[in-house]
Each structure stands twice: as C-alpha cells, then as structure tokens.
Image: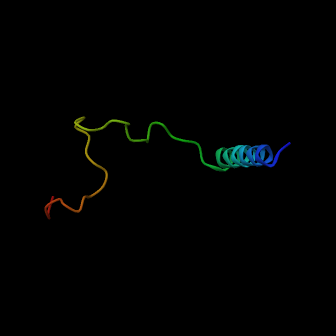
C-alpha cells in the first residue's frame, strides 16, 4: 500500500470509529420535542429571543 492509501484508510477508520462512538454515547433523539424543519409561517411561536425585537414583546 502506498502512503496515500494508508492515510485514506486511517482517515475513514477514525471517522467511522468516531461516528460509532458518538451514536453510542449520545442520548436518543426525541422526535416529538424537536422543532419542525420548516417553521417559517407556520404560526408556531419562536423559542428564543431576538436582539432586534422591541422591548416588552
């Protein structure tokens, strides 16, 4: 194997190991608590403040 092939194999191995560790150590995703992907114009209130909002709103 050449050096480039070895580096590619090491990269993909490290990436797969990292992703497996991340999936294993992260809590399960609660899909009912997640915000919708497209919420613009849905009437759903924003969950955070915005610095340009007028005071008192």
Q: 57 or 5: which is nearer to us?
A: 5
Q: 10 or 24: which is nearer to us?
A: 10
On-image quarter of the N terminus: top right
Percent from the top left, x then y, of residue 3? Answer: 80, 49
Q: How many marks?
A: 0
Residue furthest right as drawn: 1
The reply, left or right, for residue 48 in relation to residue 17 is: left
Residue 38, quarter of the rendered image? top left
In the image, residue 57 above or below residue 17? below
Image point (80%, 46%), residue name = 6
Percent from the top left, x then y, of residue 35? Answer: 38, 41
Its colouring scheme is rainbow
Percent from the top left, x then y, of residue 20? Answer: 70, 44
Image point (23%, 62%), residue name = 51
Residue 29, quarter of the rendered image? top right
Residue 37, quarter of the rendered image? top left
Image point (26%, 58%), residue name = 49
On-image quarter of the C terminus: bottom left
The reply, left or right, for residue 8 in relation to residue 30 is: right
The reply, left or right, for residue 27 in relation to residue 8 is: left
């Amino acid at each position: 194997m050449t050096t480039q092939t070895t580096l590619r194999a090491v990269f993909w191995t490290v990436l797969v190991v990292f992703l497996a560790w991340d999936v294993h150590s992260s809590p399960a995703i609660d899909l009912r608590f997640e915000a919708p992907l497209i919420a613009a114009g849905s009437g759903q209130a924003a969950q955070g403040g915005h610095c340009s909002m007028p005071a008192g709103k």
